Amino acid sequence: MRALDSQVVVITGASRGLGAAIARAFGREGARVVVNYYQSPEQTADTIAWDDYQTQVEGSVKGALHLLQACLPEMRAAGEGRFVGISSNLVQDPAVPYHDYTTGKAALLGFTRNMAGELGAEGITVNLVSGGLLDETDASAATSDAVFDAIRQNTPRGTVTTPEEVADA
């Protein structure tokens, strides 16, 4: 694998939270970073509709598919590549009722496993990083202190993971 200073890294969802932390981490290591973001409209419903699920699945899987397809020609030409998706351990342990989000991330897990199996022989790895419910993000701002306390009590370090810690992974 080439040094990071000769790499181009595309970060989607890089305007805030974990995406921004990942972009800063790659920049700090010398990579040329391309950032992308999408501003989601305010949620107005108190219920989850199919459209909410569809939005999450499309954001997770359709976005990953299109990005991977766009990058594959260059990765194949180089004989190597790294595709890293961001998931959540809420797939395994839904500590908070983010049903549509968790479903989208579960679908991303399936996509990742399929692509890893298909592309691994070409020297292209496809992986997920799952930091869990992250502290200090817009997405976790509505999470109660009781949930964060429960997470702290059930983790080996007794802390809630920050976006910067996941970015450094």
Image (cartoon, grey):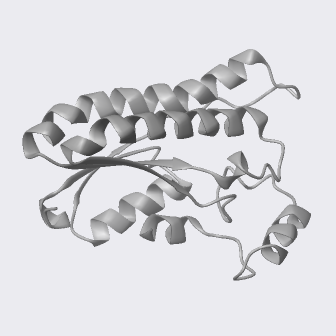
Q: Quadrant of residue 153?
A: bottom right
Q: What residue is rendered at 26% in x and 71% in y?
A: 29
Q: Nearer the viewer, residue 49 or 132?
A: 132
Q: Quadrant of the N terminus?
A: bottom left
Q: Is residue 55 left or right of residue 96?
A: left
Residue 72 is left or right of residue 64, and the answer is left
Q: Residue at x 87, y 25 (%)?
A: 47
Residue sitting at the far bottom: 157
Please, is residue 24 above or below residue 154 in the view? above
Q: Give the vertical position of 156 relative to 13 (above or below).
A: below
Q: Along the horizontal axis of the image, is 22 left or right of 102?
A: left
Residue at point 51% right, 49% down? 86
Up/down of 164 relative to 41, above or below = below
Number of dots carrying numbers: 0
* Quarter occupied by the C terminus: bottom left
Residue 161 % position (x, y): 64, 70
Furthest-right residue in view?
146
- Front position in the image: 91 or 13: 91
- Which residue is farthest left? 77
Residue 134 shows in this picture: yes
Q: Position of residue 75 (x, y in %)?
A: 17, 41
Tell me if residue 54 comes above or below residue 156 in the rendering.
above
Residue 24 in the image, given as x and y percentages of width and height: 37, 64
